[in-house]
Amino acid sequence: MSKISIYGVVPLIIIGVLGIYYLNFNVSEVSSLSKDQGDWGSFGSYFGGVVGPILAFLAYLGVKEQIKVQQNLIDQQNSNKALEDHLLRIKESFERLVKLTDEAISPLEKRASINLSETLKGDLEKAASEIDTIHVLDDLVHAGRLIQGAQFVFKSYLALIEESTRHLKIDTPLNEHKWVAIVTWREFEKKALFLLHLMRKAERFTADNPDLYSEQYKEIILYTGAYERWEQEWKRMGLGF
């Protein structure tokens, strides 16, 4: 018998016995029941001996259930705290990579005499054409590595938020995390696009000089291929590009 049915049956038994006792002595005599108070006293002792342990057991189940509920609540709170800490660590990693990427791309912006935050996407290719990539090749490769790292961390960050909010129907701090992450990425992707135009220009130069720039060529090919995959993936997710 389940705990719910036990909780329901025992009170009914007690009420039934008390009801029969009251009817037998105060309303009308029940022929099959004794009118002797001593018999009823003995029955009461017997009934109390049986029901008492049941009630004690029910009390034990109630305390056990309460402890279980409290433990589940503590576990959920610990899980939420661990999730929040994990999200915060990923967020900090992404923000740190964005800062490092800004620092790496800043010299390239100066070379092109532009400010990326104020430049339209349609003007980025023209701005990149103003830079002689041979003089910035190492900076270009360094910035490309940072952007690839940031993209990977951002994707993990966003996937974790999506998984955590999948069952939620109301706005939560996690939704705010997602909104901030997407806005940050949409600013970040302009840097990635500017870098792509520079990479494509540098690709032609390094391909023509394989003896001198074979390693840089491999890095550039890796970045341009990765960017094309990001572009398709983020468009499919509706998050930019």
Image (tube, rainbow, N blue to C red):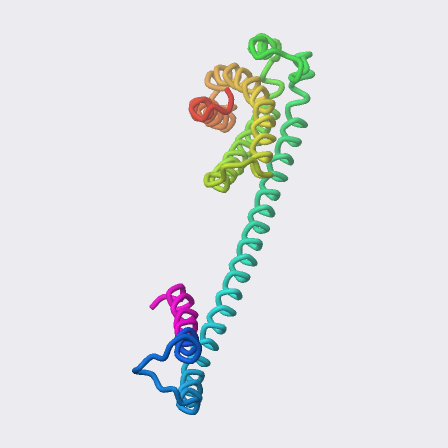
The percent coordinates of residue 40 (x first, y second) are 41, 87
The percent coordinates of residue 48 (x first, y second) are 45, 83
Residue 210, relative to residue 30: is it above or below?
Answer: above
Residue 65, relative to residue 217: is it above or below?
Answer: below
Q: Which segment did they paint magenta? A: 1-16
Q: Is residue 81 left or right of residue 11?
A: right
The percent coordinates of residue 222 (x first, y second) are 46, 27
At a point 62% along the width and 34% down the height, the residue shown is: 97
Magenta segment: does it hold 7? yes
Residue 68, relative to residue 119: is it above or below?
Answer: below
Q: Is residue 31 left or right of residue 66?
A: left
The percent coordinates of residue 204 (x first, y second) are 48, 15
Name the one closer to the observer, 141 or 156. Answer: 156
At a point 58% along the width and 9% down the height, the residue shown is: 129
In the picture as drawn, the residue positioned furthest to the bottom comes out as 38
Residue 151 in sight from this viewpoint? yes
Looking at the magenta stretch, what is its main secondary structure? Answer: helix
Q: Is residue 120 left or right of residue 40?
A: right
Residue 219, relative to residue 126: is it above or below?
Answer: below
At a point 36% along the width and 66% down the height, the residue shown is: 2
> On the rendered image, what quadrant is the N terminus found in?
bottom left
Residue 137 in sight from this viewpoint? no
